[in-house]
Amino acid sequence: MSSVYNWQLGRAMRYPFEQAAPKEQFAFVININRCIGCQTCTMACKSTWTFSRGQEHMWWTNVETKPYGGYPHHWDVRILELLHQANPAGMTWQGKPNGDPRQPYGALSGRNIFEAPDQVARGAQPNQVLGYLPSEEEWTSPNMHEDVPPAPAGKPMDFGGGEDLARGGGHKTWFFYLARLCNHCSYPACLAACPRTAIYKRPEDGIVLIDQKECRGYRKCVEACPYKKSMYRGTTRTSEKCIACYPRVEGSDPESDGVPMETRCMAACIGQVRMQGLVKVDKDNVWTEDRYNPLYYLVHVAKVALPLYPQFGTEPNGYYIPPRWVNVKYLEQMFGPGVSQAVERYRTPDRELLAVLQLFRRSNRIIARYEIKEGPKVYETTVNGKKFEMYNDTIIAFDRKNREMFRTQVEEPLHVRPPAHQNSI
Ligand code: SF4
Ligand code: SF4
Ligand code: SF4
């Protein structure tokens, strides 16, 4: 076992391989506040990569309604239970969210999935990673519990009643859509568990792939991935997972014009909630400062985008802007201690955040850098006792070759149809 640095946990941790880092890291931000659960992303991936025999139940990206939905069923509750068994005294965040990119959320005590496998009884085989193998039934009905909010115990249909279900703040009742794909983790559990070392992390972009020639279908990766994003295919007797649409990210897709392009599930998003990019990291996988890369800005400067279940320990590269109407305690279990701050900033965004939020889904190509040209103040109000001012700034996006990709404004232009065409289609 080696010691590696996990900045999301704010500390070194145990991992079966030596510390290593890619040149750049595939990462993405999903704004939950705007996801409408339309599943266009799900179908974009399905129709591109998993439409063949044996892949019928394989959804590399899926959108589940939280708190009850999950693919496979209850995947997060099951791994959280195992972590709880391994940490009877709990896992506790020490320190406060701060500006240090090596420890932005404080430090987490307790054993994660790489540190706990011996703590929980798991059968005869020694394991590198704490996990479980879902049953075949758990992989069915990927969108079960769609649009189902929580209700008080014993009152399953009482959705707005007397009991305050959101004691941490928010609506009395709630649900939200969680869009998920492989997080191309910095310390992948799938890779750590594979007895044939058939899984590798690409040094150029950190994308995690399974070598189909080497895989023998032992399903150790399926068991180990805490996000359950490695899946077994019976017809080939191998495991498969999201490949991060790597021809697009490499810029070798015919449409890409030689610069990195966003993946199918990102580019297809109707709600304009997904943004994907490549971030620079140091030898410890800590993000190096790249102030005007939109992902760096959202994660490390505005701090509105948070990692999904950082306590698992894989250092996932998927980040989420948490929903502002949901029980904060529930969200803190899912995204760590930065939730209140992130929700507050998103509720009353400052000038730069409002401008950066306009970048989502204006182009299929990856944005390397942005610039803002200031415009006039167009609106002001008070939100939760806080002053909010809106400026019609222009935000300009540049690609990797430093070419302008597009420019857009905070205030959407209004187009009035001329009277001559009022009733035409
Ligand atoms: S999300 Fe799972 S499958 Fe993807 S890299 Fe992380 S551990 Fe591996
Ligand atoms: S990145 Fe590509 S392969 Fe991965 S889930 Fe999205 S569409 Fe599917
Ligand atoms: S396409 Fe976008 S809005 Fe629709 S479900 Fe997927 S992430 Fe949500």
Image (spheres, rainbow, N blue to C red):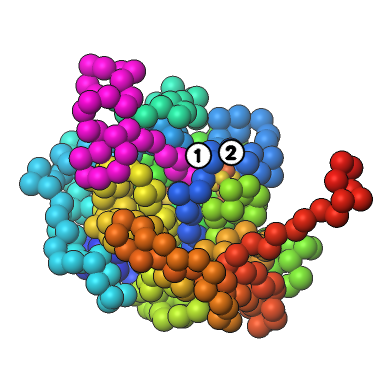
Q: Main secondary structure of the magenta part?
A: loop
Mark 2 sits near ligand 3, with its Cβ under 8 Å away: yes
In percent of width and height, residue 355 lies at 53, 70
**What label does residue 39 carry, if any?**
2
Which residue is pictured at 39% across the width and 48% down the height? 323
Q: Quadrant of the N terminus?
A: bottom left
Amino acid type, callout 1 = Val
Q: Quadrant of residue 223?
A: top left
Name the side, left or right, on which 109 lies relative to 48. Answer: left
Q: Is residue 184 visible?
A: no
Q: Is residue 162 magenta?
A: yes
Which type of secondary structure does the marked residue at label 1 adopt?
strand
In percent of width and height, residue 102 lies at 28, 74
First reached walking from the N terminus: tag 1 or tag 2 = 2
Nearer to me, 117 or 57: 57
Q: Are marks 1 and 2 in contact (CB under 8 Å)?
A: yes
Which type of secondary structure does the marked residue at label 2 adopt?
loop
Which residue is pictured at 55% across the width and 55% down the height? 274
Amino acid type, callout 2 = Gln
Q: Residue furthest right?
A: 420
Task: Give the magenta range.
Answer: 152-179
Nearer to me, 3 or 393: 393
Q: How many numbered marks are there?
A: 2
